[in-house]
Image (cartoon, rainbow, N blue to C red):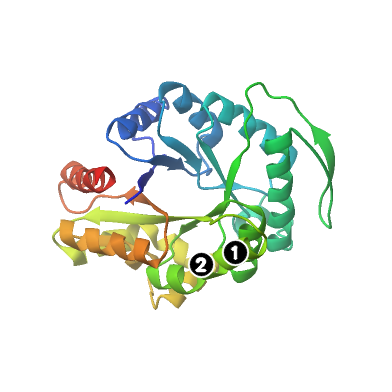
Amino acid sequence: MRIGIYGGNVRRGRPLTSLVDEIVQMEEQGFASYWTPQVGTFDALTMLALAGQATSQIELGTAVVPSYPRHPSALAQQAATVNALCGGRLVLGVGPSHRPGIEALGLAYDRPARHMREYVTILKELGAEGRVDFEGEMYRVKTGFACPEASPLTVVVSALAPLMLKAAGEVADGTVTWMVGPRTIADSTVPRITQAASAAGRGAPRVVVGLPVCVHDDKAQATARAVQIFQGYGMLPNYRRQLDAEGIDQAGEIAVVGNEDDVTAQLQAFFDAGATEVIASIYPAGDDSRGSFARTTELLQALAAA
């Protein structure tokens, strides 16, 4: 199993640089990748640039950088710089985010699938060539840059809906998901993005699946904790559709929970559905938070090694 960590949480009282130490530790423990979101805390790409200087093998990803607030040429230049500092190990995850958050910035959440298609096309051309001359329906961009040691960007898209999966398959290198279950991965995500990539003459796309994971003997308790932590996701339409497709009411019920055998079997189901990688957002349950966190980490480390 290709297992990564979906992290990015700076523990209370710890300095920001402690996250670099965590990424170094995840590399030492044998995880394939470490991913961090671009949310209302630190800048994800800046953090990964620092981590890239302190590591040598682990892949470093964003899941995801919202696209609307950043012009694609600006993001491409920043990502090319980070990728050079990481030795080509950056996976740039981008996505349109959600209408409430984008409109709160005074921006229009307009035609997200068309927006992402053009946005990623510009990113990929700038990452590969250092220049672009593009004229689309939403972007007209003629520009370039010369970043030392630049290499082509690997770009994945947070694609959920059919049109977004089609766009991701045709112009990106794959997708990164969150709050998506194995039935949806098997019946929608993988066939749609794979068909689109094949029709466009592209290679097999990456399907990176982000999931909350907790190894705990009391499944009900672990699920209840997940419901508490992740309840906000069920209110966002993009996630609500995915949860409904799985027959799930509360967002936290998507979490992978149970003892070591239970969690291993559930993770295997995602790979059987077509996932190329699982990135685990580890969360604790029960009275011993540290022990719970360590137990989950130890299982995932064993699976990554195997």
Tell me if residue 23 comes above or below residue 266 in the rendering: above
Is residue 71 at all visible to an observer of this figure? no
Q: Position of residue 111 (x, y in %)?
A: 73, 63
- On the image, which quarter does residue 166 sit in? bottom right
> Residue at the location (64% across, 28% down)?
150
Tell me if residue 296 comes above or below residue 115 in the rendering: above
Q: Position of residue 76 (x, y in %)?
A: 68, 37
Chain-order first, disc 1 or disc 2: 1
Q: Position of residue 209 (x, y in %)?
A: 43, 56
> Residue at the location (82% across, 35% down)?
143
Q: Label 2 amino acid?
A: Thr
Mark 1 in CB contact with mark 2 (< 8 angstroms): yes
Q: Which mark is residue 165?
A: 1
> Residue at the location (68% across, 45% down)?
69
Crowding at mark 1 (Cα within 10 Å: few <14, some 14-19, many 20+)? many
Crowding at mark 2 (Cα within 10 Å: few <14, some 14-19, many 20+)? many
Q: Which mark is residue 145?
A: none
* Mark 1 residue element: helix
Q: Which mark is residue 189?
A: 2
> Residue at the location (53% across, 57% down)?
204
* Mark 2 residue element: helix
Residue 243 appears left or right of 255: right
Q: Position of residue 36 (x, y in %)?
A: 46, 41
